[in-house]
Image (spheres, rainbow, N blue to C red):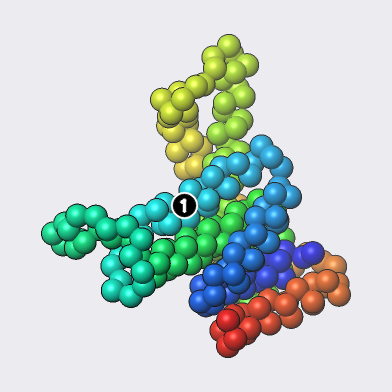
Amino acid sequence: MSPGPAAALLAAAGAAALLTDRIWAVALLTVVLLGVCLQAPPGRRGVYLFGALTSGFGVLVLSPFLWSSPHGTILWEGATIPVLGPLDVTTTELSEAALNALRLTALGLAFAAYALLLDHDRLVAAAGVARRSALAVALATRLVPSLERDAAGLAESVRGRGIRLEGVRGYATLLSPLVAGSLERATSLAEAMEARGFGRPGFTRAPRPPWSVRDRLALALAALLVLVAALWL
């Protein structure tokens, strides 16, 4: 599948997760997106899956205590704290917490699939309109994968010198070279864009294969997914 339709489909899945109010629909989207993320290499997907799943779990655990609803059956009743109010858990609060947790998890998994599986260079090259905006989005979203690759390379170099990084303190020593490498990459990218005439009127484009039937179906499915989530779910 081409990166453009794939990005549109992932964006539609995230939008549908925010639009629908049915837990089963958001749960289904979350499971599908999790299956897509599991297609990525095991060595890379762990950080993204951990971030998406733990964020959703945090919302599920904390939200019932931070948001109070007078409706529903009280499952647990605690003390009353100033500003926060009574620390009780009702079925309505738990249901809303599960819905919001699944929404956040689905969004996290959609971004993880975007960062792990899409070719961002091809995505920028395929942009026919709003090229500057597409370039800015692609550069911003590829920051985490770039830092991940740099960190893996630095850790491998350190291990080759007989030093093993362990724990948060050990990996924190990579922060300084990662920042320096990011600044150097940004400078090199700016020089390359200037040398290629970025921002000047007129541009050339490398030939690319036409969209396949799968790409067109993906675009249709993305539009249908958002429409169904907005009108019926």
The answer to which quarter of the image holds residue 24 is bottom right
Name the residue furthest bottom: 231
Residue in the image at 58% along x and 81% along y: 233
Figure check: 64 above or below 191: below
Residue in the image at 74% along x and 67% along y: 205
- Front in this rendered view, residue 115 or 68: 68
List x then y, in percent, for residue 143: 53, 50
* Residue that badge 1 annotates: 57
Name the residue furthest top: 162
Residue in the image at 66% along x and 71% along y: 8
- Front in this rendered view, residue 104 or 66: 66
Q: In this view, does 51 lie to the left or right of 45?
A: left
Residue in the image at 28% along x and 74% along y: 70
| Mark 1: few/some/many CA within 10 Å (<14, 14-19, 20+) | some
Q: Which structural element holds mark 1?
A: helix
Residue 3 appearing in the image: yes
List x then y, in percent, for residue 80: 17, 58
The quarter of the picture where the N terminus appears is: bottom right
The answer to which quarter of the image holds residue 22 is bottom right
Q: Is residue 59 left or right of residue 77?
A: right
Residue 180 appearing in the image: no
List x then y, in percent, for residue 192: 60, 52
Name the residue furthest left: 82
The answer to which quarter of the image holds residue 79 is bottom left
Q: Which amino acid does label 1 sit on?
A: Phe
User: How many circles with numbers are drawn on the protein?
Assistant: 1
- Front in this rendered view, residue 36 or 66: 66
- Front in this rendered view, residue 153 or 30: 30
List x then y, in percent, for residue 55: 46, 52
